[in-house]
Image (cartoon, rainbow, N blue to C red):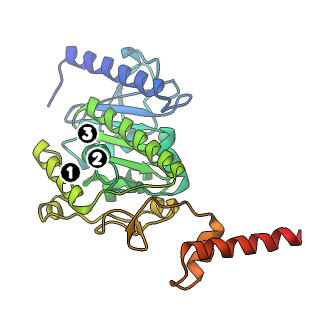
Amino acid sequence: MAVSVANEFKIKQQLCDIGHRIWLKGFCAGNEGNHSYRIGPNRFLCTPTGISKGFLKPDDICVVDGSGKQLSGKRKRTSEFLLHAQIYAARPDVNAVIHSHPPHATAFAVAGVELPTCIHPEAEVFLGPVHTAKYVTPGDKRLGESIMPYVKDSNTIILANHGVVCFHADLEQCYYQLEIVDAYSRILLLAKQLGSVNPLKSDEMAELIQLKKKFGLPDPRMEEASKGSVSCATSDFMSRVGGGDFGSRGRMSINGGTCAVKPQSPLERAIGSMIPEQYSESDIEQLVQIITDQIMASV
Ligand SMILES: [Zn+2]
C-alpha cells in the first residue's frame, strides 16, 4: 500500500477533522492526544506535539517512518508515536491509531477498574473486551510494550492512569471506537448511580458475537459463541454496583431472584463479607444501623 500525494493531502485533512471532533467532544484538554495513519510500508502521517488537536491544519501533520524518524513536516512529531509504531508493527491490518484521554473511560483508567463485558450491545459489537494495560510514563517506549499482551485480540485498550488507545484499518471507524468506549464508560457510571446493572444473558451474548461474525468483525470469544453460550468475566465494576456474580447465570441476582441490585455502603460490604450466609440483606442493614447508632452515641 502506498498513497499518492493527492491522497496524502486528503488524509492529512481527515486527520485534522478527526482532531477537531476529538476536541469538540472534550476528549483532549490542552495539547493532549495524538493520532496517526499508515500511508506506506514504512511511512506514516502523525499529529505534531505541543499543539491543540482541535485546530490542526494539513501543514501541521508530520510524516515519519516506523522507527519514529521524522521525514517531513514543519512541526515536531508527537512523542507518543512509538506507541503507534508498535501497534502498526504488531498489526499489519491496522492503518489508523488514535490515542486520547476521554474523561469517562479515563476515569476507569484512574480508578483501576476494568471495563466489564456482557452489558451493552454497541460496546460488545464494536469494541469487544477492553483490557487495561499497566501504567507507564507517557511518551516512554515501554508504553508500546505495556499494551502488547492485548494488541492482537482487541481494538481498544485502556492505559492505566493515562487514557485510551484505539486502532483500526479505517480512520473513521477508529474514531468511532473512541466515542463508543467513552459513551459506554459514561453509561456504566450513570447506571451505577441508578443502582443497578443488568448484564446480558450468556445466550444473548452468543447471539451478539455471532452477529459480529456476519459483519466480518473478529472477536476472541467467537468459538465459545458458536457453542451457544459466552461466559462473562466478572469485573471489579460489577462488585462496586453491589453484586458481581453474573455471567453464565445471566442477570445479576440476589437470593435466586432477578432484581435490581441495591448499592451497598462500604460498611455494609465489609460486614456482609464477614457474617455467615444465612443472614439476609435486611439483617445486614439492621446490624449496620445498630453499629452506626452506637458510633453516633459515642461521639
Ligand atoms: Zn496520552
> Considering the numbered disc 2 on the image, is that residue within a helix, a strand or a loop?
helix
Please identify the residue farthest to the right as the structure is shown: 299
Q: Which percent across, then down, holds residue 44?
A: 29, 31
Q: Is mark 1 within 8 Å of ligand 1?
A: no
Q: If the image is split into quadrants, where does the C terminus sit?
A: bottom right
The image shows residue 73 at horizontal and vertical percentages of: 38, 20
Sequence-wise, the earlier of marks 1 and 3 is 3
In this view, 294 is above or below 190: below
Residue 264 at what x, y percent from top left?
A: 58, 63
Q: Is mark 2 within 8 Å of ligand 1?
A: no
Residue beneath disc 3: 168
Residue 13 visible in the picture = yes
* Among the two numbered marks 3 and 2 on one chain, the one whose residue lies closer to the N terminus: 2
Q: Quadrant of residue 61?
A: top left
**Left or right of 87 in this view: 273:** right
Residue that label 2 marks:
121
Residue at 13% across / 42% down in the picture?
A: 215
Give yes or no for contact between labels 1 and 2 (Cβ–Cβ under 8 Å). yes
Total labels: the figure holds 3
| Amino acid, disc 1 | Leu
Badge 1 marks a residue whose secondary structure is: helix
Badge 1: few (under 14), some or many (20 or more) residues near its Cα, within 10 Å? many
Query: Is residue 161 at all visible to an observer of this figure?
Result: no
Q: Residues within 10 Å of mark 3 (few under 14, many from 20)?
A: many
Q: Is residue 143 above or below residue 149?
A: above
Tag 1 residue: 208
User: Is residue 133 left or right of 280 when viewed as pictured?
Assistant: left
Q: Secondary structure at mark 3?
A: strand
Residue type at the position of mark 2 = Pro
Q: Give the amino acid type for the residue marked by disc 3 in the picture.
A: His
